[in-house]
Amino acid sequence: MGLLRARAGFAAGEARPDLPEKTADPHDIHAAIILFGSPGSGKGTQAKLLGQCLAGPHISTGDMLREHISAGDEIGKEAQRLTKAGKLVPDEMVNALVKQRLAAADCEPGVILDGYPRTVNQAKVLLGLMESDGFKPSVLHLVVDYEKIVARLSGRRQCPVCGTLYSLTTSPPKVAGICDRDGAALVTREDDREEVIRERLHEYDVQTVPILNFFKESGVPLFEVNAGDATPDQVKRRVWERLMEAGVLPATAGSR
Ligand code: AMP
């Protein structure tokens, strides 16, 4: 179990024999976990589970922008125009949103960042914010075998009438191509076509690799965790065991 020493007035990490050891407290750690994962890696689910472990918020810039879009404010109008066209919103806009969000009191135990940074410029700004706000950044990359993602997603079929999803491998309909519930002919959703999936995975690599390289070169700890072949709960266990061993998550995290 990871123990931290109380260290008022002493250099960081230096033990004080006159003070009792105290159990790692989330507030001492002030972790910022920067989450990356390709489409189909279960990133959204893991972000929520990790938020529970850390007792800090899951900050998704996509969700923040959608809130502004629903509110119909100036940021929302600009974000709607760009996201509809499949474009990223300007760096300055998301940087300002994240800066403001990180200053909120609920971020004290730590944060999970999801969907941010999306550019190297955003990554640079984020590292500056981490330094000024005293967060300890780490990168968590959920790694999955792309061929398995393609096989899983392209094997999905949906009923156009009731919306039920089937998997040709794990939960096929009783009669091939026909919905069990209402007898409608099943379809492949546009997003589940193999070419579309491969294109999205390729785009993910093009966008993400330079950012991961930037973090590596900047000395930010990077954790790659295999997120394939396992249930969300098993992946969560793998993730928090790795992060706890490395002292990124508090030792109490697993009990949540
Ligand atoms: P997401 O839910 O993360 O896929 O985000 C939805 C959309 O919001 C994206 O397609 C982008 O247009 C925009 N967006 C979200 N996060 C960012 C970011 N960090 N930088 C620029 N645009 C973003």
Image: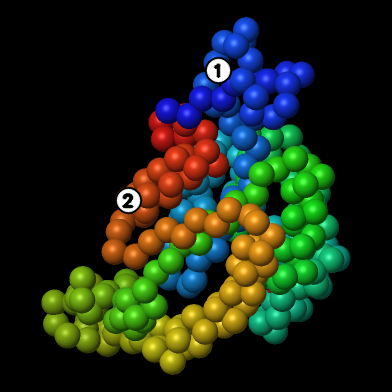
Residue pictured at 22% horizontal, 86% vertical: 177
Helix, strand or loop at mark 2:
helix
Give the numbered dot on residue 112. Answer: none
In the image, is residue 24 above or below residue 80?
Answer: above
Provide residue 156's location: percent of width, then percent of height. Answer: 32, 79
Q: Nearer the viewer, residue 122 or 190?
A: 122
Residue pictured at 74% horizontal, 78% vertical: 82
Question: Would residue 113 be visible to someone looking at this image?
Answer: no
Question: How many C-alpha atoms fall within 10 Å of the one at disc 2: few (<14), some, or many (≥20)?
Answer: few
Q: Nearer the viewer, residue 77 or 43?
A: 43
Give the numbered dot on residue 234. Answer: 2
In the image, is residue 180 above or below residue 131?
Answer: below
The extreme top residue here reads 18
- The amino acid pointed to by label 2 is Gln
Looking at the rendered image, the quarter that the N terminus falls into is: top left
Helix, strand or loop at mark 1:
strand
Q: Nearer the viewer, residue 62 or 25?
A: 25
Q: Disc 1 marks which residue?
A: 22
- The amino acid pointed to by label 1 is Lys
Left or right of residue 61, residue 35 in this image: left
Residue pictured at 60% horizontal, 67% vertical: 212
Dot 1 and dot 2 residues touching (CB under 8 Å): no
